Image: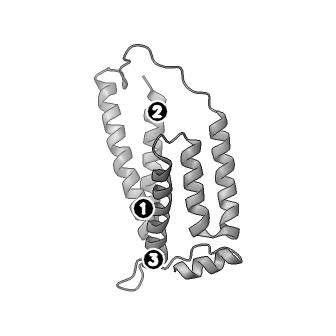
Amino acid sequence: MAYGDLVFKGVLLAACILFLSRVSDIPPPYSGQVGPRVWPEIILWGMVVLLGVSVISQFVQVLRRRPVMEPEGKQPPPEPLFRLANVLAAVLFGAYIIGLDFLGFLVATPLFIIIFLRLMRYRGHPVKGLVIGCAVTLVIAFVFGKMFYLPLPRGMGVFRDFTHLMY
């Protein structure tokens, strides 16, 4: 039985509730505008709901004295924590953060998503990975760039010109 997991989720749930109470101190914006407290509230409420459901279901299983995960035959051995793909993913993420300033959001993000999918052994067709990378990038650019007027990194040189052509 993973009591430590239950305690960790409970502490995380309490922290989310505490942060949610602190977010209400942020002053509301002018009417008709999305204010700075909307995103933290959405994320925190989502975390509270998901953690609450998880804690309740795990607590009920503890009370019934059933294991949380019933073993089905032999379990495969856990993968090592520092697998080469995990280390490369961390390096790729660092390169993405650095590359945002030079390449801009519209170029760096699809590249990151495509390389990340290949690194994590995505089994779909390579064109599907390209479509996923471009679609996710365009949706994020539209939502944050056009709807919320959040300035996204535009890049330098020819990448900046490309970004100006797109939005």
The x, y position of residue 24, in whole percent, is: 42, 68
Q: Position of residue 61 (x, y in %)?
A: 31, 27
Q: Which class describes the residues within 10 Å of circle 3: few (<14), some (14-19), or many (20+)? A: few
Q: Amino acid at mark 1?
A: Ser
Distance from Cα at disc 3 to Cα at disc 1 = 24 Å
Quarter of the image for the N terminus: give it. Answer: top left
Q: Are marks 2 and 1 in contact (CB under 8 Å)?
A: no
Q: Is 29 placed left or right of 95 in the picture?
A: left
Amino acid under disc 3 = Phe
Foreground: disc 3 or disc 1 = 3
Report helix, strand or loop for mark 1: helix
Few, some or many residues within 10 Å of mark 2 (<14, 14–19, 20+): few
Q: Amino acid at mark 2?
A: Asp
> What residue lies at 43% left-to-right and 71% top-to-bottom?
143
Could you say which quadrant of the image residue 147 lies in? bottom left
Q: Are marks 2 and 3 in contact (CB under 8 Å)?
A: no
Q: Secondary structure at mark 2?
A: helix
Tell me what residue is drawn at x 47 percent, y 68 percent: 138
Pair 2/1: label in front? 2
**What number is the disc on residue 21?**
1
For marks 3 and 1 on the same chain, the one whose residue lies earlier in the sequence:
1
Q: Please state if 144 lies on the left or on the right of 93 as rendered.
A: left
**Residue under numbered circle 2:** 5
